Image (cartoon, grey):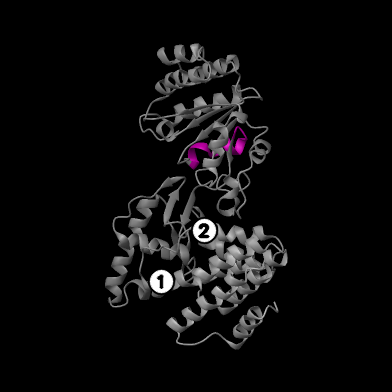
C-alpha cells in the first residue's frame, strides 16, 4: 500500500508552463519518477545522459549524436558549432535551431548527469552561464530544456533564477520551502541534514572533509544550538581540560570549520555564540521540530502537515556519532518522530482510513514498542476490520514485549479490550 504523495506529471507541467530552462532540485525526492515520466512515451521528450566529464563543445557534439536515436537527421548545426569551437552563445543558437527542426518535435530536451559538464573544472562558469543564458532566451515557448544534476551551484544559478530565466523545479519541496527562493535572497546558503546521514552543502556544494571528527562535531553542535555560551561548549567537548587549553583547542577547531565552509559560522555577542548571518542556514532538524511544535499547538486536520515532518526524518539524528549530546538529541528527535507517526495515524482513523492508520501505527510501534496505547489502537483497528486473529496477535506481541523488557503485564485497560475482542464485543 502506498501512503505517500506521489509525483504527478500535471504538477510539473503546471509549475513549468511559462519556463524554458528548468533545473531539477538535487534534493527533490521524486526526481527518479520525473525522469521515468520523461522516458515514457507520453512526455514527448528527447533524453540524453552524459557519461563522462566533458567541455561545452564535446557536450554539444555528443548530444547531437545521441539525439539521432530520436531523429536520424538531428544536429547538423550543433555538430558544425561543436567542430568549429563556436562561442557559447552561438552553440546555444545552433542547438535551438536543431531542436526546432527536429522530427518528431520534442516538448522537452532532458539532459541527465549534467554534473559532468556543470562541475567540470575545465569549463569556466562564465562559459556555462553564457550558453545556458542564451539557451533560455532563444528557446520558443513550446520547447523546454530540463537539466538534472546531483549538485547545483547556488552562486552560479541564483541570478538566473531570481531574474526568472531559469526555474528550479522541486525547490519549494525542500528545506524552508526553497533554497533558490527569489523572495529570500541571501549571500550564501548552508544546508545541514542531521536527519539524512549528516550531509552538509554550502551553496549546493558538499562538504566532504572536515580535517578530523572534532571540527565536524563542533559544527553540528553550533548548528543545533544557535545560541550557546562558551562554558556550554567547553563542558560538552573538553570538560577535563584547563580553560586555557580548552580555549586554544576551541579556536583552532572553530577556524577549521570556517576554512571548510568558506564563511564564519558563528559570531560572539552578548555572552553567546550566535549565527554569524553570513549564510542562510537551512537545517532539517529545525524544520522538523518547527512542524511538530506547530502541530502540537494547532492539531491539523490535514495529514500532509504530519507527513511534512515524517518525510524529513530519513535517518536517526547523526546515527554514526556517539557523543553524549548527540545521543540525547537523537532520543528526543526519535520520540518526536514517533509523535508525528501517531498524530497522522490518529488523523487517518478519524477519517475512517483504517489501512493508512494501521500503517503509521505500526511504524510508530517500531519506534516506541512499549507504548500500550499504540497496541490498543492497532487491536481496535484490526477488530473493526474483522481481523480478530491479528488483534489477538497484537495483544500477544505487546505481552511479550512488556514481559521481556519491563517484567510486567499489559494494563487493565488493555486486558479489558483484549477480552472484549475475544468475546466478539468490539
**Magenta residue check for 81:** no
Give the residue at mark 2: 284
Left or right of residue 422, residue 133 in this image = left
What is the quadrant of residue 205 in the picture?
top left
Residue occupying image coordinates x 60% and y 51%: 177
Give the residue at mark 1: 327
In the image, 199 versus 363, the foreground residue is 363
Q: Secondary structure at mark 2?
A: helix
Residue occupying image coordinates x 45% and y 33%: 114
In the image, 342 versus 359, the foreground residue is 359
Q: Secondary structure at mark 1?
A: helix
Q: Which residues are magenta?
A: 154-166
Tell me where residue 404 appears, x and y as whole percent. Answer: 43, 82
Which quadrant would the C terminus be assigned to in this image? Answer: bottom right
What's the distance in space between the residues labelled 1 and 2, CA to CA?
Answer: 17 Å
In the image, 385 versus 305, the foreground residue is 385
Whichever of labels 1 and 2 marks the residue nearer the N terminus, that label is 2
**Total number of numbered discs in the rendering:** 2
Tell me where residue 223 appears, x and y as whole percent. Answer: 46, 62
Which quadrant would the N terminus be assigned to in this image? Answer: bottom right
Q: Is residue 397 above or below residue 76?
A: below
Tell me where residue 123 appears, x and y as whole percent. Answer: 39, 29
How crowded pointer 2 is (Cα within 10 Å; few <14, some 14-19, many 20+) is rated as many
- The disc at residue 221 is none
How crowded pointer 1 is (Cα within 10 Å; few <14, some 14-19, many 20+) is rated as some
Amino acid at each position: 500500500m502506498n501512503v505517500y504523495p506521489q509525483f504527478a506529471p500535471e504538477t510539473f507541467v503546471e509549475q513549468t508552463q511559462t519556463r524554458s530552462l528548468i533545473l531539477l532540485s538535487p534534493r527533490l525526492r521524486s526526481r527518479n519518477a520525473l525522469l521515468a515520466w520523461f522516458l515514457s512515451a507520453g512526455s514527448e521528450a528527447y533524453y540524453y545522459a552524459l557519461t563522462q566529464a566533458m567541455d561545452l563543445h564535446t557536450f554539444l557534439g555528443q548530444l547531437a549524436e545521441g539525439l539521432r536515436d530520436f531523429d536520424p537527421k538531428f544536429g547538423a548545426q550543433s555538430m558544425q558549432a561543436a567542430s568549429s569551437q563556436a562561442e557559447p552563445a552561438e552553440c546555444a543558437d545552433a542547438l535551438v535551431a536543431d531542436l526546432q527542426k527536429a522530427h518528431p518535435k520534442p516538448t522537452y530536451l532532458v539532459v541527465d548527469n549534467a554534473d559532468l559538464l556543470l562541475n567540470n573544472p575545465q569549463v569556466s562558469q562564465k562559459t556555462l552561464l553564457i550558453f545556458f543564458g542564451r539557451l533560455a532566451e532563444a528557446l520558443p515557448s513550446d520547447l523546454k530544456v530540463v537539466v538534472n544534476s546531483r549538485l547545483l551551484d547556488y552562486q552560479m544559478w541564483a541570478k538566473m533564477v531570481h531574474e526568472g530565466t531559469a526555474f528550479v523545479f522541486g525547490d519549494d519541496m525542500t528545506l524552508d520551502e526553497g533554497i533558490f527562493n527569489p523572495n529570500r535572497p541571501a549571500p550564501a546558503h548552508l544546508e545541514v541534514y542531521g536527519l539524512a546521514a549528516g550531509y552538509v552543502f554550502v551553496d549546493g556544494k558538499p562538504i566532504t572533509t572536515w580535517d578530523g571528527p572534532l571540527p565536524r562535531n563542533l559544527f553540528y553542535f553550533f548548528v543545533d544550538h544557535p545560541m550557546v555560551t562558551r562554558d556550554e561548549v567547553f563542558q560538552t567537548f573538553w570538560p577535563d581540560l584547563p580553560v586555557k587549553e580548552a580555549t586554544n583547542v576551541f579556536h583552532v577547531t572553530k577556524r577549521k570549520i570556517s576554512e571548510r565552509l568558506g564563511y564564519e559560522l558563528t559570531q560572539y555577542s552578548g555572552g553567546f555564540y550566535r549565527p554569524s548571518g553570513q549564510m542562510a542556514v537551512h537545517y532539517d532538524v529545525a524544520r522538523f521540530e518547527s512542524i511538530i511544535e506547530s502541530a502540537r499547538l494547532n492539531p491539523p486536520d490535514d495529514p500532509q502537515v504530519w507527513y511534512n515532518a515524517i518525510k524529513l526524518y530519513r535517518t536517526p539524528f547523526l546515527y554514526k556519532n556517539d557523543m553524549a549530546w548527540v545521543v540525547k538529541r537523537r532520543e528526543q528527535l526519535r520520540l518526536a518522530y514517533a509523535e508525528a507517526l501517531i498524530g497522522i495515524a490518529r488523523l487517518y482513523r478519524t477519517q475512517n482510513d483504517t489501512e493508512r492508520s494501521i500503517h503509521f501505527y505500526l511504524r510508530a510501534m517500531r519506534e516506541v514498542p512499549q507504548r500500550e496505547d499504540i497496541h490498543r489502537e492497532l487491536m481496535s483497528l484490526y477488530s473493526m476490520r474483522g481481523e480478530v486473529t491479528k488483534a489477538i496477535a497484537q495483544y500477544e506481541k505487546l505481552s511479550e514485549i512488556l514481559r521481556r523488557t519491563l517484567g510486567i503485564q499489559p494494563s487493565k485497560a488493555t486486558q479489558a479490550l483484549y477480552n472484549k475482542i475475544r468475546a466478539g464485543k468490539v
